[in-house]
């Protein structure tokens, strides 16, 4: 839905609470999806638009922490914000250790809630973009022919063209042509760019004598 | 012939004794308050015997026919008097004596008496021919009138016969019915009379025995026998008087010393006597109180002195159920004392009936009761608070839900209003939700507040199902927290009863919390759950709480309702003992048992009560 600032998943076993939070978040421009328990929520994962989860620590059939660990297995990027009527130290520490973004105690003031959600959604957006980026790079890399991939690996080790041609057993001219194609397909401006892309792809350089 | 011979002496002694006995009986009959008639009749008998003796003596010495006739008439009159007195005396003394016989004898002899008076020579002789001198012992002689018998003398003879029959019959019947001593007395005297009068006299008539008639002596023995009991009674009376006096003194000491009020009143409620303890309370002495109405100090008696009577007379028979009444006494200083009062009717045989009030001052006791009740109330309150303390965490959470909802709703509304356009319908929804959630929170708080109040001795209508549901609501979160499932199996309609709703809730809450602790202890895979039943049987409402825990350990079974018994740390262990006490306050009961598949059932029985009870 365009025009919304993000999608918030509200998981709480109390209906009045879900409705109230939905209204508040809607008034701030977010779109909400409401779930009474973890099961319903986990079914819609993974989610590839910016958003976050507002998760109550205590649900009727399982603990919020369990839902969070299940979530991490299915979608590592979606941020989790815990809320609870209890607010004891132990649960909050545990929640944070498991990677939650924040822990809010009920009743939750709108200013605090919106601030936290805002940063969580932005975080998610960033992560999504990064994920996206890597996907694009991966796509580009897979478009390279095996020979081109080989050339890339040698180039990023910092070897000179002459040495690469000897190493691969092909003519220098051929190497130059391959390198140009790699640079174009990978959309790198310089060898350093290429190197950085390769790091993101976790491609190891090939040592050339 | 000297006057002082053995005959004169003998008869004089006889007359003397009879005279004495007559006087004694007369005196006793006039002075004593009981059985006057018997003593007067005996006196009559005795005096008749006196006259008879005098007459006989005169006849013995008489030489003149006219004189003899005169004395004969007197003698017969004396016999008449004697026998009539004797007949009615026996009638009074022996209950089985026959009235018709007595009347017949009296009637006949009255006729004889009249004949005797109006005849010339008395009833005995129709004509006096001569007076013969008969020799007897001691070389003395006595006069004996001679002549043909009077035709109506047979009346006297018939009467004598009837008399014999009457006495013998009366003696035997009375002996059989248990009046031993009296029957013996009458019987013995009859026998002696027969011997002396009935046997001796005919022998004298026939000339076989040469003595005068000894009828006087027969009469003397009868008088002696009849008086014997009197003499014995007189002796016993002195003894009894001594005993009674001692006994009286002893009881008086008891009444004086006991810390009880003892007040004697007549049947109209006027005071006759108060004991020293009562004097202290009333601030007046007995002398000042006599003849004042008791109602002046115990106002409640003004309405109906008789209405409070307890009914037990001194012979020990209980006439009605003895009841004790709580009354108020106000003395002249306007001090009020609360008393437990019992009224006893005292009906002694020969004195005026009185009512005795025995009262105990229970002011101190009432004060103690009040303190005890206060302490118990406080204790119940503390355990309630402690129960609630166990729920703090869940209650906080419970309250947080509505608070969160209200806050978020309100803040959302503000934002909606800030951004135009906004939907009015949504705003209404928001406001409705806010109101509902606030009410929910208030409900929870109200429950908590009720539990923490200390309201003693409350009699309010109780809707048992509603109470159960409110407790379940309060504990909903706790159940979720421990992951225990709660099933409600409530009767559709329960009769209304009266009692203290908060106390009942305390009992149910206690049972539920115990069940919550017990249920999860099972080792097997059955998930912990607790079931609450409500039902009614006859006049009793029944609440049963079942869990599927491990059940009650055998060693604990007898003791779980005792105070300070617990199987979990941190618990004082008063909950169940107080719960049981609350049940008993409502005339009900709390019991526990293990159920078939493992687990325990606690049953709370609450009898139906009306408002008045």
Image (cartoon, coloured by chain):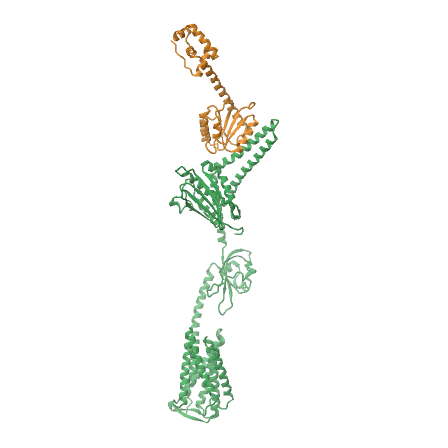
Chain colours: A orange, B green
Residue B228 spot, x, y in % from top left: 42, 77
Instruction: Give the total number of marks visible in the rendering.
Output: 0
User: In what quadrant of the picture does the N terminus of chain B appear?
Assistant: bottom left
Nearest the eye: A85 or B466: B466
Above or below, comparing residue A100 to residue B572 in the picture? above
Residue B220 spot, x, y in % from top left: 43, 82
Nearest the eye: B557 or B549: B549
The residue located at (44%, 66%) in the rendering is B247
Above or below, comparing residue A70 to residue B56 in the picture? above
Nearest the eye: B219 or B526: B526
Nearest the eye: B29 or A192: A192
Q: State the residue lying farthest toward the bottom.
A: B129
Residue B69 in sight: yes
Residue B382 in sight: no
Residue B435 spot, x, y in % from top left: 57, 36
Please tell me in which quadrant of the rendered image residue B230 appears.
bottom left
Above or below, comparing residue B420 to residue A209 in the picture? below
Residue A28 spot, x, y in % from top left: 56, 26
């Amino acid at each position: 839905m365009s025009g919304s600032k993000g999608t918030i998943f509200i998981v709480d076993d109390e209906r009045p609470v879900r409705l109230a939070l939905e209204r508040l978040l809607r008034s701030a421009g977010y779109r909400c999806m409401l779930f009474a328990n973890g099961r319903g929520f986990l079914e819609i994962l993974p989610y590839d638009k910016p958003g976050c989860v507002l998760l109550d620590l205590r649900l009727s059939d399982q603990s919020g922490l369990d839902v969070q660990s299940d979530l991490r297995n299915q979608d590592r990027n979606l941020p989790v914000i815990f809320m609870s009527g209890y607010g004891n130290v132990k649960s909050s520490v545990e929640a944070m250790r498991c990677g939650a973004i924040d822990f809010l105690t009920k009743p939750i003031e709108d200013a605090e809630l919106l601030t936290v959600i805002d940063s969580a959604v932005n975080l998610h957006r960033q992560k999504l973009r990064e994920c996206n980026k890597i996907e694009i790079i991966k796509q580009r890399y897979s478009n390279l022919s095996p020979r081109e991939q080989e050339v890339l690996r040698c180039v990023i080790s910092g070897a000179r063209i002459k040495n690469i041609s000897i190493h691969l057993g092909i003519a220098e001219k051929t190497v130059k042509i391959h390198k140009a194609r790699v640079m174009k397909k990978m959309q790198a401006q310089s060898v350093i760019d290429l190197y950085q892309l390769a790091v993101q792809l976790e491609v190891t350089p090939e040592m050339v004598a | 012939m000297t006057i002082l011979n053995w005959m004169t002496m003998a008869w004089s002694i006889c007359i003397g004794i009879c005279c004495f006995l007559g006087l004694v009986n007369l005196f006793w009959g006039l002075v004593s308050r009981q059985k006057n008639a018997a003593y007067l009749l005996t006196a009559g008998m005795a005096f008749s015997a006196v006259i008879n003796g005098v007459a006989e003596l005169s006849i013995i010495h008489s030489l003149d026919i006219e004189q003899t006739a005169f004395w004969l008439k007197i003698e017969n009159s004396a016999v008449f008097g004697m026998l009539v007195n004797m007949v009615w005396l026996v009638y009074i003394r022996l209950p089985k004596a026959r009235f018709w016989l007595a009347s017949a004898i009296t009637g006949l002899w009255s006729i004889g008496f009249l004949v005797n008076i109006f005849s010339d020579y008395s009833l005995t002789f129709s004509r006096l021919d001569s007076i013969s001198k008969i020799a007897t012992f001691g070389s003395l002689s006595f006069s004996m009138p001679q002549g043909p018998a009077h035709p109506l003398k047979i009346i006297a003879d018939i009467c004598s016969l009837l008399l014999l029959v009457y006495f013998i019959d009366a003696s035997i019947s009375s002996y059989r019915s248990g009046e031993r001593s009296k029957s013996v007395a009458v019987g013995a005297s009859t026998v002696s009379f027969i011997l002396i009068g009935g046997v001796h006299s005919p022998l004298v008539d026939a000339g076989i025995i040469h003595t005068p008639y000894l009828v006087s002596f027969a009469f003397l023995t009868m008088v002696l026998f009849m008086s014997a009991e009197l003499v014995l009674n007189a002796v016993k009376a002195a003894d009894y008087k001594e005993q009674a006096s001692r006994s009286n003194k002893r009881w008086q000491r008891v009444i004086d010393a006991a810390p009880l009020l003892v007040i004697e009143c007549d049947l109209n409620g006027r005071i006759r006597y108060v004991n020293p303890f009562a004097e202290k309370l009333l601030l007046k002495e007995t002398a000042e109180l006599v003849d004042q109405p008791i109602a002046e100090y115990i106002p409640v008696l003004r309405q109906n002195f008789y209405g409070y009577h307890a009914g037990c007379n001194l012979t020990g028979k209980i006439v009605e159920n003895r009841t004790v009444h709580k009354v108020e006494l106000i003395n002249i200083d306007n001090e009020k004392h609360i008393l437990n009062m019992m009224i006893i009717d005292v009906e002694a045989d020969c004195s005026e009936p009185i009512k005795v009030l025995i009262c105990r001052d229970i002011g101190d006791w009432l004060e103690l009761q009040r303190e005890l009740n206060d302490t118990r109330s406080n204790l119940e309150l503390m355990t309630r608070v402690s129960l609630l303390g166990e729920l703090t965490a869940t209650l906080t959470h419970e309250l947080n839900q509505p608070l969160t909802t209200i806050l978020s709703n309100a803040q959302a509304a503000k934002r909606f209003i800030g951004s135009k356009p906004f939907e009015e319908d949504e705003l209404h929804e928001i406001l409705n939700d806010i109101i509902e959630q606030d009410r929910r929170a208030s409900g929870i708080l109200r429950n908590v507040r009720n539990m923490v109040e200390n309201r003693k001795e409350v009699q309010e209508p109780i809707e048992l199902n509603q109470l159960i549901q409110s407790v379940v609501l309060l504990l909903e979160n706790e159940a979720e927290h421990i992951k225990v499932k709660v099933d409600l199996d409530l009767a559709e309609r329960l009769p209304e009863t009266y009692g203290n709703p908060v106390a009942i809730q305390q009992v149910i809450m206690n049972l539920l919390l115990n069940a919550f602790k017990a249920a999860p202890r099972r080792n097997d895979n059955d998930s912990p759950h607790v079931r609450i039943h409500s039902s009614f049987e006859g006049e009793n409402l029944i609440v049963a709480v079942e869990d599927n825990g491990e059940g009650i350990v055998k060693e604990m079974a007898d003791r779980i309702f005792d105070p300070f018994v617990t199987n979990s740390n941190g618990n004082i262990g008063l909950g169940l003992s107080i719960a049981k006490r609350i049940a008993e306050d409502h005339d009900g009961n709390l019991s526990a048992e293990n159920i078939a598949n493992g687990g325990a059932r606690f049953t709370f029985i609450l009898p139906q009560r009306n408002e008045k009870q």
